[in-house]
Image (cartoon, rainbow, N blue to C red):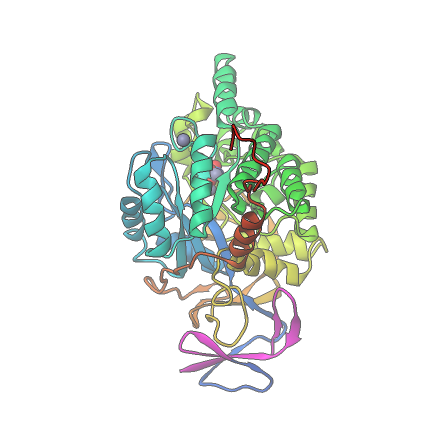
Amino acid sequence: MTTVIKNGTVVTADLSYKADVKIDGGKIVEIGPNLSGDETLDATGCYVMPGGIDPHTHLEMPFMGTYSSDDFESGTRAALSGGTTMVVDFALPSPGQSLLEALTMWDNKTSRANCDFSFHMAITWWSEQVFNEMQTIVQDKGINSFKHFMAYKGALMVDDDEMFHSFQRCAELGALPMVHAENGDIVAQMQAKLLADGNNGPEAHAYSRPAAVEGEATNRAIIIADMAGSPLYVVHTSCEQAHEAIRRARQNGMRVYGEPLIQHLTLDESEYANPDWDHAARRVMSPPFRNKQHQDSLWAGLSAGSLQVVATDHCAFTTAQKRFGVGDFTKIPNGTGGLEDRMPMLWTHGVATGRITMNEFVAVTSTNIAKILNMYPKKGAILVGADADLVVWDPKRSKTISAASQQSAIDYNVFEGKQVTGLPRYTLTGGMVAIEESTIKTREGQGKFVKRDPFTAVNRALSTWKDITAPRKVQRTGIPASGV
Ligand code: URP
Ligand code: ZN
Ligand code: ZN
Ligand code: ZN
């Protein structure tokens, strides 16, 4: 059966034009005027865009003594309802655990996924086994990105030595290292001091993780990547100091990418001053929300191109889970939701305000990350042969965000009460209509794992340059008799 999306305006990362889009067998088969098919979806007044890709989710993740509450079913249903058609989740070995074993655990979570997904692998410890398994992960398992936590001391954190080993291995394998950049040693001491001083509420979470601590770690990771000859992807870039380090590195020719979250772009630190403990604790995540100057820096980075991707870090905990930290903010599970709200919030606060263009919206929600993770143009494109993961975006549809009507499994929404204008009329995953306005038509198990090959153009360019500029022994002619 063929489907035609008719009368819409196709909007990609570089073009906007009137055309119909024809789909067959889950792929785009034709783009042009006056197409017909077995089924027609009316896109009058709408933009037909590549479905969103969220490269930063934690679905059913074991963390801080509990599991994040959205799994691959509710998480991908939430994603689709907001126009996101693919998620990339983090497989997380415990320190000492085999990467392959962790991958099997993550594979086992995904049988009910409603949209396509892929994985990044986390490096939470270092050994010869990890060194060897990284090759299998890249060459046999279709994963070309490795995440490193520079924070969460005593749990997931790795040190500079481990990162340098791992980044060099990434360079050899044609993979992309990623970092959660915060100085975990300083955070741990700040937490202890705040608690000792009786500062035990959720606001102390933000006090313990200032922007400078993120900026320092971002810069350190950039230098380590440069020494290792690898590119670098900085997740949840939340502040000017981190953005500045990324901007500077890029100006110096380094291949560094930065990923602000929709939460950091639109919510600020005043949330932690709320007198309601639950309100503040529900917004505890790392890095914490920042002030308006930091937000302006992130928005500027998106329009200037120094930041490339908007993600969510979707890691949803219920109020009951957040209350594990009553009396001790360090025990509040870190994480917030956002999968369902990323695209409407970014459209409302980005495109509708003139901060970014429609084409930039497509770039930062889909196309850029598809290229960075080496799955373009299968994903992130409207081209013949691309997967029919599409969103028919109605710029006039609006709603007020509310936990009462959300798909996510938790009992609140950090964007509660926000009015958004710009929502999917249809979301298609593999050519199937999963969302029709407010009607959910998702199919459990529809989502498939997306393999990603190593050695992007950037990896190749970097290794060529590193080869050419590598230290070389000087070949001398006049060697003194006593030496070499
Ligand atoms: O607070 C956060 N961000 N929770 C999820 C884990 C992480 O650091 O990405
Ligand atoms: Zn070592
Ligand atoms: Zn993180
Ligand atoms: Zn995360």
What residue occupies the far right of the structure in this picture? 354
- Quarter of the image where one finds residue 113: bottom left
- Chief secondary structure of the magenta portion: strand
- Residue 481: x %, y % from top left: 53, 30
Residue 408 in view in this figure: no
**6 or 213, nearer to the observer:** 213
Vertical placement of residue 327 versus 151, above or below: above
What residue occupies the far top of the structure in this picture? 197
Q: Magenta stretch containing residue 401, yes or no?
A: no
Vertical placement of residue 384 versus 158, above or below: below
- Residue 256: x %, y % from top left: 58, 46
Residue 261 in view in this figure: yes
What residue occupies the far front of the structure in this picture? 481
- Residue 158: x %, y % from top left: 43, 32
Q: Which residue is drawn at 35% across and 55% down?
A: 139
Vertical placement of residue 24 versus 283, above or below: below
Q: How many marks?
A: 0
Residue 98 left/right relative to 19: left
Where is ligand 2, by quadrant?
top left
- Quarter of the image where one finds residue 447: bottom left
**450 or 163, nearer to the observer:** 163
Residue 324 left/right relative to 412: left
Q: Which residue is drawn at 57% across and 80% down?
A: 20
Q: Quadrant of the N terminus?
A: bottom left
- Residue 245: x %, y % from top left: 64, 38
Q: Magenta stretch containing residue 18, yes or no?
A: yes
The residue range painted magenta reads: 1-29
